[in-house]
Image: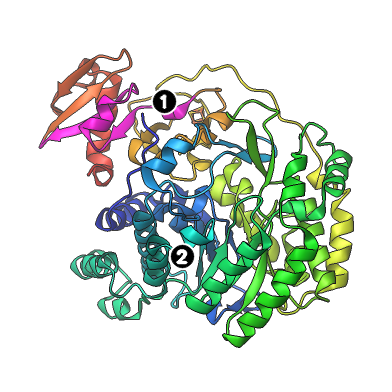
Amino acid sequence: MTELMRVIPFENMIDICLNDYYTKGKIMEIDEKYFFRGNNENLSMNYNGEYLRFPIGPAAGPHTQLCQNILTAYLTGSRFFEVKTVQVVDGREMMKMIPRPCIDAKNAGYNVEWSTELTVEEAKEEYIKASILLQVFAIELGLSDVKDFVINISVGYDLKGITSKKISDFIDDLKDASNTEIYKECIEVLKKNINKFKKFKLEDIEKITPHITNTVTLSTMHGAKPEEIFDIASHLIVDKKMNTYVKCNPTLLGYDNVRKILDELGYNDIVLKREGFDNDLQFDNAVEIFTKLKKLGKENGLNVGVKLTNTLAVYNAKGYLTGESMYMSGKPLYPIAINVSKTFAEAFDGDINISFSAGIDRNNVISVLKAGIAPVTFSTILLKPRGYINTNGIIDQLINEDIEFGKLNVDAIKELAEYAKTDSNYRNKGEGKLLEDTLPTFDCFKKNCGICVDVCPNRANIKVEDKHFEAPYQILHIEDRCNECGNCHLFCTRGGYPYFKKPTLYSTVEDFESSKNPGFVKIGENKYKIRDEKKNVYEYEPDFNKSDDEKEKIQVLLETIIKDYSYIIY
Ligand code: SF4
Ligand code: SF4
């Protein structure tokens, strides 16, 4: 096992999605019954000139790194995608800097990862592929006849990096992808495979837009100086002509206020970093910066806003993740971020765009949007049991609402901010206990479980129905898609590590050999290399005429995959 992810080539992605859907009634492990088909034009908005059907979706993070993650979010109802941040440090260099596991979403959310682990070039390609894929499957699945989503890119972290050729080209290519190799390749793949679609037609290819984005969120380093934040945002507005949101830290609320909110909600165990509050941007400077940026935006015909908030850097007092610090999100961040929103709303008398990301869930989404804060994004809730399907719960709350997007409602935000400080939904309900590891390789549950499938942001665990076993399906781990974030372990009902213990499909011999998982890799026309449960490695030629009683369990499972799921082997 390695944390190295390999992206799915566009042609294989099309093949996987079509086969999954037409033979199994699901796509990327989302059953058709969870595809969100509702509509309410009262929820739509014009977002920087683009039609946005619902102003909700995944925040920059684990759910927006890979093309399949963005598609999965779209299927379950998301329409606003803040894709994972890019910076000059990328690919393997970034991967080595991230300790594993890197996510702990058991109670509050914590992580020790920040920007993409792909190269900036690969990230660009994933975002272009995703934009095209969504437009194609919106038509094929009857979800929308028009492009109804927005992709918002995110760049970090300092002036030198953001003005570098690498990041500058990234922005330019996503503003207009028509001359990129990947865009041309995707269009060719669609033409070549057009007969495989039932509803998506040749003439629909013409409607696909190469304009992937016109909006960027700026992420700066903790402790970034106000002048540098202003200079980077000015560069994005004036030189790159992007609608620009600047992500601010929750430290803007001040140490004492944050401590008080956390203590009153029972998070006494969260150890704050006082120096972070002292070194980060101060509120007076923030008001000065946004006053000047709003003017600059107006002069350039672009929208400017604030994104609230970044995660909160805290001491790693839990010790589950490694390193001195970790970044807090989820439930405890909501009352803090909504109080930061209040200070902005008051300071600008409601005349500032706020987009929001901090502990959004089905309980607060309506009030936050009704207060004029939009779009809203989320991540921690998608890491919990049900995973992406939790979006259904959020959007179900909204679907009958009539929301007018426009100026902030300062009084409503003040009320929300006050209420959040004692709202029992955001109280600390405890971690729950860690279970002893009793996870077997096969047949790990009697009744339906599949939690490790739902909670995986990358769709790296899948259900394989195989009648030769006792359980209705076996969990197959797909090595290419996994970055060892650890989320499936924390929620496994047998306390185990599905990404280490479950039968694993490899796409390269190199990956197979650098791993200890039981699993298989294709090495010839009808030839596979297998590592069985006892760690024996041998070559195997599937023989469908031989009785199953004469085969090892792993051989039986491999043959089922070859027969019924051949499209995932490439
Ligand atoms: S399989 Fe588990 S460890 Fe791997 S990416 Fe998915 S959730 Fe993370
Ligand atoms: S969460 Fe654990 S017990 Fe449940 S299906 Fe996955 S591996 Fe098996």
User: What kind of residue is marked 1?
Assistant: Phe
**x and y percent of residue 244 in the render?**
58, 71
Viewer-closest of 76 and 321: 321
Residue plotted at (25% across, 25% down): 513
**Quarter-of-image position of residue 436:** top right
Residue 525 visible, this angle: yes
User: What kind of residue is marked 2?
Assistant: Thr
Image quadrant holding the C terminus, namely: top left
What colouring style does the render use?
A: rainbow
Image quadrant holding the N terminus, namely: top left
Q: Which residues are magenta?
A: 497-525
Viewer-closest of 241 and 184: 241
**Quarter-of-image position of residue 272:** top right
User: Would you name the residue on which mark 1 appears?
Assistant: 500
Q: Earlier in the sequence, mark 2 or mark 1?
A: 2
Give the SS element for disc 2: loop
Left or right, residue 259 beside residue 523: right
Residue plotted at (79% across, 67% down): 344
Which residue in the rendered view is the most extreme toward the left?
Answer: 525
Residue 141 visible, this angle: no
Instruction: Give the CA distance from mark 2 to mark 1.
Output: 40 Å
Q: Is residue 222 above or below residue 202?
A: above
Give the SS element for disc 1: helix
Is residue 149 magenta-colored?
A: no
Circle 2 Cα neighbour tier, 10 Å, few/some/many (<14 / 14–19 / ≥20): some
Residue plotted at (19% across, 26% down): 529
Q: Is residue 56 above or below residue 50?
A: above
Tag nearer the camera, 2 or 1 = 2
Is residue 514 magenta-colored?
A: yes
User: Would you name the residue on which mark 2 appears?
Assistant: 163
